[in-house]
Amino acid sequence: MRIRYGCCALALAASAAGARAQTAPAYTHADTLRGFDGPGRAWWDVAFYDLHVRVGAADSSVAGWNAITYRVLQPASELQLDLLAPLVLDSVVQDGRRLTWRQDGNAYFVALRAPQRRGESRTLTAWYHGRPRVRGPGTGPGAGAFGWYRDSLGGQWFATSDELVGASIWWPLKDYLGDEPDSQRIAITVPDPLVDVSNGRLRSTTHHADGTTTYEWFVAEPINSYDVAANAGPYAHFADTLAGEGGRLSLDFWPASYHLDTARAQWRQVQPMLRCFEHWFGPYPWYADGYKLVEAPYLGMEHQSGIAYGNQYRTGYLGRDLSGTGLGLNWDYIVIHESAHEWFGNSVTARQYADLWVHESFATYAEGLYTECQRGPTAGAAYLIGLRRGVRNAQPIVGPPGMPWYHTDLYTKGANVLHTIRQLVDDDYRWRMILRGLQQTFRHQTVTGQQVQDYISHESGIDLSRVFAQYLTTTMVPELQYRVDDTTLAYRWADVVPGFAMRVRVNIPGLGTRWLAATDQWQTLGVPSAEAANLAVDENFYVTARNVGALTPAPSGGR
């Protein structure tokens, strides 16, 4: 779920000198099995998931199977499947033969009887059942959703949302962000008269004599596993189209039947939102699968081609403006933020949870871009600057490799890092081409955070390596220290990683707006008078500034 709260009290010991002391995180063997591309995973590449799930209303149970087609990258004899307890793996079948396995917590290492030859495609089917660990639809730390719910009118709902815990909470798979199927079938059987809405396009609806219906959806393009969703409820439907950069895009809306009129009014902002994001990021990534907005009994989630919506048809974040500027009350937070993830998070996907800033920082930054599309650059900047009040700087943005990592600064601080880099680029057209280029270069791929950093540095023509190291791997905010002695201004960066250099825009009385090419070493500039001590740093830069006193004697270099 997209929430403004950290999921865990985790911290990473920052590697940069001078960073605040951090408490080493405690991780488990299970975290390692889930987060790393271990020996039971690295040898095979998922091509297709054929998922069939029957959902029981009486006991919140699930039962079904997943046929996994994969490509063999190198010969192996053991395959890791993930299925979260208390679900039970009933059987695994390949070539008509049942296979055995050894279990290590939530990981099942299946012994393969047939040779796995490099370059060939194989299929393995996992059968399972059980009552998943039910998660409530709240908005607190680690909140998500899985199970049955009742609305205020007594209507029944079933919903899934599993970004943090993983898709293996409700179906067996290779539960690893770094490997996505090229396509997927999602066949969900639910009690009548509920309607299931999942990802992609509806291929068939099959009614059964036992009072259930199977809804078969098909995703034609790659999808990350936590985006796969089942949503069953008392839905109504209406549709529209967008003449977009990629052609004719189908828009499908699935509100609760009793919210139909309200949804028609509230969701009108989808079209201007898509036009805005196509302008900044390039074509919507999923023309083959369409765009859907689906009401859900929890706050929201970026389920690919089927955004889950639970913002109660209010503007802002459940009626609140997270920036404190009032600008966030001009649009629906869930519609805007979650849809931005179609580009950053769904099309360009972090290979591991340690790099979730690639999802959350860009999607939060997109909120500022949408405000800019609505009301101009000054308003967009003001919104992002306002979000700084939510920055905690208690943990670095980048987490330890392979491990769970999620906290609020991935959103607010990360967005302001991007806003600061836009100032350094100092060319809005070039910045837009960088954002669009990220989508074009890494379209439908999993990436590392380093790849994103390197791309922005290369395309901007600026070495941003120390800037990223500062903001992503430490909790320190760069401080511009300065002194004025008569007609000499001295300045440097403090609380920074070694070798940090970043120019900054300032207004100096008597000189006007100037760029200071500041480093972690003292530098000087001639100024008209001591009034230069009243300089002001452009607030679009996420930094602080401090007058550290007169120059006596003049600086001789060093820190």
Image (cartoon, rainbow, N blue to C red):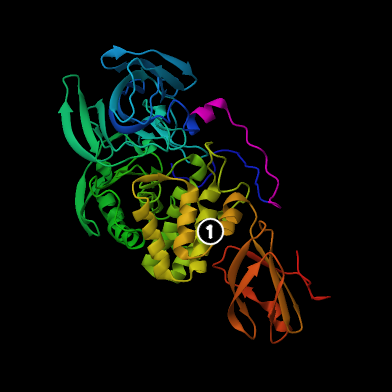
Residue range in magenta is 17-33
Across the whole image, how many numbered discs are drawn on residues? 1
Residue 80 at x, y = what percent? Answer: 42, 24
Q: Residues within 10 Å of mark 1 (few under 14, many from 20)?
A: many
Residue 180 at x, y = what percent? Answer: 35, 37
Front residue of 338 and 70: 70
Main SS of the magenta segment?
A: loop
Whether residue 24 appears in magenta in the rendering, the answer is yes
Residue type at the position of mark 1 = Val
Front residue of 322 and 224: 224
Q: Is residue 276 above or below residue 197?
A: below
Q: Is residue 535 left or right of residue 161?
A: right
Rendering quarter of residue 544: bottom right
Determine the secondary structure under disc 1: helix
Residue 324 at x, y = what percent? Answer: 52, 60
Whether residue 374 appears in magenta in the rendering, the answer is no
- The residue indicated by pointer 1 is 417
Residue at the location (31% across, 54% down)? 266
Residue at the location (40% across, 47% down)? 345
The N terminus lies in quadrant: top left
Can I make out residue 156 in this image? no
Q: Is residue 108 above or below residue 402?
A: above
The C terminus lies in quadrant: bottom right
Front residue of 430 and 147: 430
Q: Is residue 516 left or right of residue 196?
A: right
Residue 513 at x, y = what percent? Answer: 57, 80
